[in-house]
Image (cartoon, helix red, strand yellow):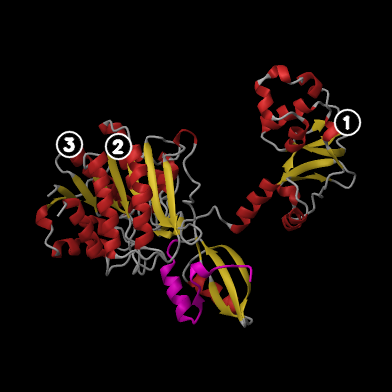
């Protein structure tokens, strides 16, 4: 799944010579936390976050007393003074998996997406990535999650899939299938049904163990 | 002793879900036989179902959805919206009888003919959404009853308590923006049970913020946890809302012997929950309580669960 399919195209951007109060307004209006900074040719030159702006402004409790705050002075601060230059960017041909792994390494709120020439193509935020991950896991479809312990040998998954198919149950996803204990794997199928009783019986009769949900964990 | 209505109609058995389907006519037969054999029928006000006017169905479901459902039942296809939802030629009419019976129970309570009621209906309702069938449910019986109470009987605040082991996604979504209908659900944690909604942070939306409350219970838990949360949370929260009528989505599938869930409520545990809900109705709602069957699939346990449920309503 490519980032080009899930990123926000034509994102709201800001000019490097804009003042920070303008950028703050834009963020509030569109409910974004990051704005890419571009030049006249759509070339990405930086990113500015709401946190950058907050750090440049006096603390919020001073706002109650306008006399204390020289707002004019703050309106003179330009985006280029506070933006992150050369932000971490990704290409539209990055996959969802690439972006998730990169996100784990670099603690940022969003990646600007640029082409080979450095032209801004879009932006993808942590919340966009999470939304996609929720979609991949099938969490928004009604269903039931099972955990089946199977022997770690070729062909086990086929038997499980066959059993589920014989019950006319559709798959939402198969969440994880990995080493569980010596010679065993754990398979977590997410099944789009409420009617799970007959399948559970069938799987048990096939000799599989259904793991008590309170013992589920994936990081073994 | 209270004057308790008991809605049961053999036509509810005509909704044929095919062989090996858990939501079977046997469930209702077991409930009726249980109540009969316990000698409770003479103490109850029995009444039969009547079909609901589409006008009331349309307060919750779109016209298009109702048409689609009717057309599906008139066709040769055997499932509707999802393979879980088995239908037959009679399903549409029987679903209208389920809603109509519940509305009649509401009418009888509101006119004072009876104090409260248990509606043993099929098909169940709490998963049914505005625009789709789900989890064996086609029309949201309880949601339509809430709208009927408000539109026909001038009730301002309706409280819905849903103790089916599955979250009533349909009921929640229908009322999530509505501050006048409080939806309170206790169910198995959505990560471990159908349909995957009803998390603790789903608390309503917009004006309805705060009028939805979800209490997920982890697998393997039972009487102690339910009892604790009923006392600690359900009672004070509902008393604060002060519903004028209480509707109960009564699902008996949290029983330890019911293989639809991993919750381990005992028969006595179920009674204790219902006793508190009845006390709540006494305290807030002038005793006005209409309980509507949702899930519950253990044929062996349904009779005793229904008998105890009805005895609590009768206050005997």
Quadrant location, the C terminus of chain B? bottom left
Regarding residue A168, the answer to whether it shows in the image is yes
Marks 1 and 3: in contact by CB < 8 Å? no
Quickly name the residue at label 2: B148
Distance of label 2 from label 1 (alpha carbons): 60 Å
Q: Which residues are magenta?
A: A194-220
* Residue at position x 60%, y 64% in the image: A175
How dense is the environment of label 2, judged by Cα within 10 Å: few (below 14), some, or many (20 and up)?
A: some
How dense is the environment of label 3, judged by Cα within 10 Å: few (below 14), some, or many (20 and up)?
A: few
Residue B1, image x, y percentages: 12, 50
Marks 1 and 2: in contact by CB < 8 Å? no
The chain letter under disc 1 is A
- Position above or below: B86 against A45: below
* Residue at position x 85%, y 31% in the image: A16
Quickly name the residue at label 1: A40
Marks 3 and 2: in contact by CB < 8 Å? no
Mark 2 or mark 3: whose residue is earlier in sequence: 3
Foreground: B174 or A54?
A54
């Amino acid at each position: 799944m490519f980032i080009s399919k899930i990123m926000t195209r034509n994102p709201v951007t800001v000019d490097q010579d804009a003042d920070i109060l303008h950028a703050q307004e834009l963020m509030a209006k569109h409910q974004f936390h990051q704005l890419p900074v571009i030049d006249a040719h759509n070339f990405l030159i930086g990113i500015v976050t709401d946190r950058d702006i907050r750090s440049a402004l006096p603390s919020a409790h001073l706002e109650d007393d306008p006399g204390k705050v020289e707002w004019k002075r703050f309106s003179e601060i330009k985006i280029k003074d506070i933006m992150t230059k050369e932000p971490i960017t990704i290409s539209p041909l990055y996959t969802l998996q690439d972006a998730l792994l990169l996100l784990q390494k670099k603690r940022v709120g969003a990646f600007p997406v640029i082409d080979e020439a450095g032209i801004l193509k879009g932006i993808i935020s942590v919340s966009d990535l999470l939304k996609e991950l929720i979609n991949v896991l099938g969490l928004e479809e009604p269903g039931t999650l099972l955990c089946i312990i199977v022997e770690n040998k070729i062909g086990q998954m086929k038997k499980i899939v066959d059993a589920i198919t014989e019950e006319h149950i559709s798959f939402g996803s198969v969440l994880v299938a990995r080493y569980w204990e010596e010679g065993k794997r754990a398979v977590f199928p997410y099944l789009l049904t409420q009617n799970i009783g007959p399948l559970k019986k069938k799987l048990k009769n096939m000799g599989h163990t259904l793991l008590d949900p309170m013992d589920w964990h994936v990081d073994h | 002793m209270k004057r308790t209505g008991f809605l049961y109609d053999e036509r509810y058995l005509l909704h044929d879900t095919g062989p090996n389907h858990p939501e079977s006519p046997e469930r209702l037969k077991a409930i009726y036989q249980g109540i009969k054999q316990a000698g409770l029928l003479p103490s109850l006000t029995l009444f039969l179902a009547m079909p609901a006017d589409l006008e009331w169905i349309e307060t919750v479901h779109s016209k298009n959805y109702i048409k689609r459902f009717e057309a599906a039942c008139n066709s040769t296809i055997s499932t509707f919206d999802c393979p879980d939802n088995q239908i037959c030629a009679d399903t549409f009419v029987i679903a209208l009888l389920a809603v109509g019976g519940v509305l009649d129970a509401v009418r009888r309570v509101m006119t004072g003919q009876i104090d409260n009621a248990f509606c043993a209906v099929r098909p169940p309702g709490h998963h049914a959404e505005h625009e789709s069938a789900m989890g064996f449910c086609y029309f949201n019986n309880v949601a339509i009853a809430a709208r009927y109470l408000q539109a026909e009987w001038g009730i301002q605040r309706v409280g819905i308590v849903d103790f089916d082991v599955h979250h009533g996604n349909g009921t929640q979504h229908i009322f999530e923006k509505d501050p006048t209908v409080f939806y309170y659900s206790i169910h198995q944690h959505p990560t471990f049970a159908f349909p995957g909604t009803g998390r603790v942070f789903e608390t309503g939306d917009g004006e309805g913020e705060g009028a939805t409350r979800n209490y997920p219970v982890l697998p393997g838990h039972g009487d102690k946890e339910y009892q604790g949360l009923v006392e600690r949370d359900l009672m004070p929260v509902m008393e604060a809302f002060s519903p004028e009528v209480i509707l109960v989505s009564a699902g008996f599938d949290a029983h330890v012997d019911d293989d639809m869930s991993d919750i381990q409520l005992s028969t006595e545990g179920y009674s204790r929950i219902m006793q508190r809900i009845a006390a709540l109705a006494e305290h807030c709602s002038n005793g006005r309580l209409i309980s509507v069957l949702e899930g519950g699939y253990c044929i062996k346990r349904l009779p005793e669960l229904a008998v105890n449920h009805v005895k609590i309503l009768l206050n005997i």
